[in-house]
Image (cartoon, rainbow, N blue to C red):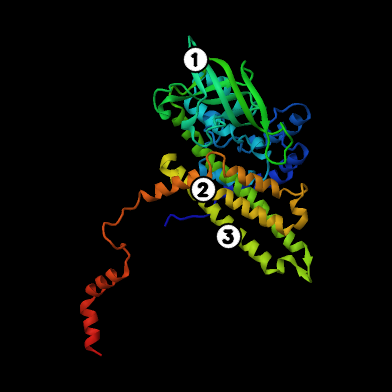
C-alpha cells in the first residue's frame, strides 16, 4: 500500500518554522504596509523586508518552485501546496518567500521559452525579487474568450508595432515589464496566430488609462490596469517563445497558476475558520456561548468539512502534477479545483462574518475582503463556468452512450440477468419450500 498522508519530518520542520515566521514576522507587514506588496522596495520598507527575505533564503525556502539552476529548490507541487497554504494567510508572505503571483507564472514561461538575453534582462531580476511583472492578456470586449482578441502586433522592418487595449492587467502600475498576448497573424486560427511579447512598461505608447480597483477601493488606486497600447514599438528580440506560440505558452503558465491560487486559498479559508471558532468560544448571547448554539455548530461543521475536502482535493491534484509532469494530463482535476475554490472561500468567510455580527461587516475585520477575493477567484484565470464545462467534457470522455432503449442500470433487465445467473440456486430454494 502506497497511501500516505504524512509529511517527511525534515520538511515538516521547515513548515513549522514557516508557520511561526509568517505569523510573527510577515503578517504584521499586511497592517504596516497594506496593499504595498507589489511596490518596489525602497527606504524603510527595504530595511524591514530584506532581512526577512534573507532568513527565508537561509532556510532554503526562497522561490522553492524553481529548479536549482534558477536559485530555487525544485520542490514539486505537493511540497509547494503545503508551504503555500501557510503563505496564503498573508498578502506579503509570497513576496517574502519569492513566490508571488503573477511573477511565478511569468518567471516559469520566461525560463521555459525565453532566450538567454531575455532571461538575463527579465528573469534573473524577477527571481531576485528586485522587480515585478504583469501578464497583460484580457481585453475589455472579449472577456474569457481569447479567440476574440484584437490587440495586434505588425512587423515593421526589424521591429513589431503593437496596437490595442488590454483590461485587468494586474500590477501593471508597479511592474517593470509586461508580457502581452497579441494577434500576429489574423489569417489563421487564433491558436496558431497569436504571440507573446516582453514589453518594458516605460516603452513609448504604453498608456495606463486607469488602475481599476475592486469594490470599496478608491478610484484609480486599484491594481488592475486598463492599458492602451498605442503604436508601441518593440524590437524583434521582444518576441517570447516564437511567433504563433502564445496559446502553448499560456497553458504552461495558467496550469500551474490555477493550482497555486488554490493552495493559498486553503490558508486564507483556514484563517477564516480559525477566527470563526475563536469568536464562537468567546461570545455569549441568550444565556450561553455562541459555540453552544446548534446553528453556529452547523456553520463550524460545514466549514471544516468543506475545507478538508478542498484541501485533500488540492493536495491530490498537486500529487498528480508531480507524478505525471504534464499539466494536460491533470487538466480535469486542475479545472475542478478552480471550480471549487471560490465557493469554499466565500462560504467559510461568509459564515465567519455572520458569527462576528456587526463587527464582521466592518473594515476592522477582513471578511468582506475575503468574500470579494472569492468573487475574483471565480473569474481570474478563466471564469468558473468555463472550467465547469472543461470538467464535464473531460469526465464524459470516460463514458459511452447506451445503444439500448433502457439505461445500463435498468433494474428489470438486471433482475432477470441475476435470476438467470443463479437459476439453479433459486430453483433449489423453491424446491425446499
Mark 3 → mark 1, Cα distance in angstroms? 53 Å
Disc sitting over residue 236 in the figure: 1
Which mark is first along the chain, 1 or 3? 1
Q: Tell whether 227 sits left or right of 221.
A: left
Seen from the viewer's position, the closer of residues 155 and 115 is 155
Residue at 44 percent of width and 48 percent of height: 391
SS category of the residue bearing label 2 = helix
Could you tell me if residue 223 is visible in this image?
yes
Please, which residue is most extreme toward the bottom here?
433
The residue at which mark 3 appears reads as: 305
- Compared to residue 23, the image places residue 351 above or below, namely below
- Compared to residue 138, the image places residue 88 above or below, namely below
Number of residues whose C-alpha sits closer than 10 Å to that of mark 1, classed few (under 14), some (14–19) or many (20 or more): some
SS category of the residue bearing label 3 = helix
Could you tell me if residue 128 is visible in this image?
no
Mark 2 → mark 1, Cα distance in angstroms? 38 Å
The residue at which mark 2 appears reads as: 337
Kindly check if marks 3 and 1 are in contact, taking CB atoms under 8 A apart as contact: no
Number of residues whose C-alpha sits closer than 10 Å to that of mark 3, classed few (under 14), some (14–19) or many (20 or more): few
Residue 305: % across, % down: 58, 60
SS category of the residue bearing label 1 = helix
Residue 57: % across, % down: 64, 34
Amino acid at each position: 500500500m502506497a497511501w500516505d498522508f504524512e509529511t517527511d519530518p525534515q520538511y515538516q520542520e521547515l513548515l513549522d518554522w514557516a508557520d511561526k515566521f509568517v505569523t510573527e514576522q510577515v503578517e504584521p507587514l499586511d497592517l504596516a504596509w497594506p496593499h504595498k506588496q507589489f511596490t518596489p522596495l525602497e527606504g524603510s520598507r527595504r530595511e524591514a523586508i530584506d532581512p526577512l527575505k534573507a532568513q527565508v533564503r537561509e532556510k532554503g525556502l526562497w522561490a522553492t518552485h524553481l529548479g536549482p539552476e534558477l536559485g530555487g529548490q525544485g520542490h514539486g507541487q505537493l511540497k509547494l501546496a503545503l508551504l503555500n497554504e501557510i503563505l496564503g494567510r498573508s498578502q506579503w508572505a509570497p513576496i517574502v518567500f519569492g513566490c508571488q503571483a503573477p511573477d511565478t507564472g511569468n518567471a516559469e514561461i520566461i525560463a521555459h521559452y525565453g532566450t538567454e538575453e531575455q532571461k538575463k534582462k527579465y528573469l534573473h531580476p524577477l527571481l531576485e525579487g528586485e522587480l515585478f511583472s504583469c501578464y497583460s492578456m484580457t481585453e475589455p470586449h472579449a472577456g474569457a474568450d481569447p479567440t476574440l482578441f484584437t490587440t495586434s502586433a505588425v512587423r515593421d522592418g526589424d521591429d513589431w508595432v503593437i496596437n490595442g487595449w488590454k483590461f485587468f492587467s494586474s500590477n501593471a502600475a508597479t511592474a517593470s515589464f509586461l508580457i502581452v498576448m497579441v494577434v500576429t497573424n489574423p489569417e489563421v486560427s487564433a491558436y496558431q496566430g497569436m504571440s507573446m511579447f516582453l514589453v518594458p512598461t516605460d516603452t513609448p505608447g504604453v498608456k495606463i488609462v486607469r488602475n481599476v480597483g475592486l469594490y470599496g477601493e478608491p478610484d484609480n488606486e486599484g491594481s488592475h490596469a486598463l492599458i492602451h497600447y498605442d503604436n508601441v514599438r518593440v524590437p524583434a528580440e521582444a518576441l517570447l517563445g516564437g511567433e504563433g506560440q502564445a496559446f502553448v505558452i499560456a497553458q504552461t503558465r495558467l496550469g500551474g497558476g490555477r493550482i497555486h491560487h488554490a493552495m493559498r486559498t486553503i490558508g486564507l479559508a483556514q484563517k477564516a475558520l480559525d477566527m470563526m471558532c475563536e469568536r464562537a468560544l468567546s461570545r455569549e448571547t441568550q444565556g450561553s456561548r455562541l459555540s453552544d448554539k446548534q446553528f453556529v455548530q452547523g456553520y463550524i461543521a460545514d466549514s471544516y468539512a468543506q475545507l478538508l475536502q478542498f484541501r485533500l482535493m488540492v493536495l491530490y491534484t498537486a500529487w498528480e502534477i508531480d507524478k505525471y509532469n504534464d499539466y494536460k494530463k491533470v487538466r480535469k482535476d486542475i479545472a475542478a479545483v478552480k471550480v471549487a475554490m471560490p465557493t469554499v472561500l466565500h462560504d467559510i468567510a461568509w459564515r465567519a462574518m455572520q458569527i462576528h455580527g456587526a463587527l464582521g461587516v466592518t473594515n476592522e475585520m477582513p471578511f468582506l475582503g475575503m468574500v470579494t477575493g472569492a468573487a475574483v477567484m471565480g473569474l481570474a484565470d478563466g471564469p468558473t463556468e468555463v472550467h465547469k464545462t472543461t470538467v464535464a467534457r473531460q469526465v464524459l470522455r470516460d463514458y459511452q452512450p447506451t445503444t439500448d432503449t433502457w439505461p445500463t442500470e435498468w433494474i428489470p433487465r438486471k433482475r432477470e440477468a441475476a435470476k438467470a445467473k443463479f437459476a439453479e440456486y433459486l430453483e433449489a430454494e423453491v424446491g425446499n419450500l
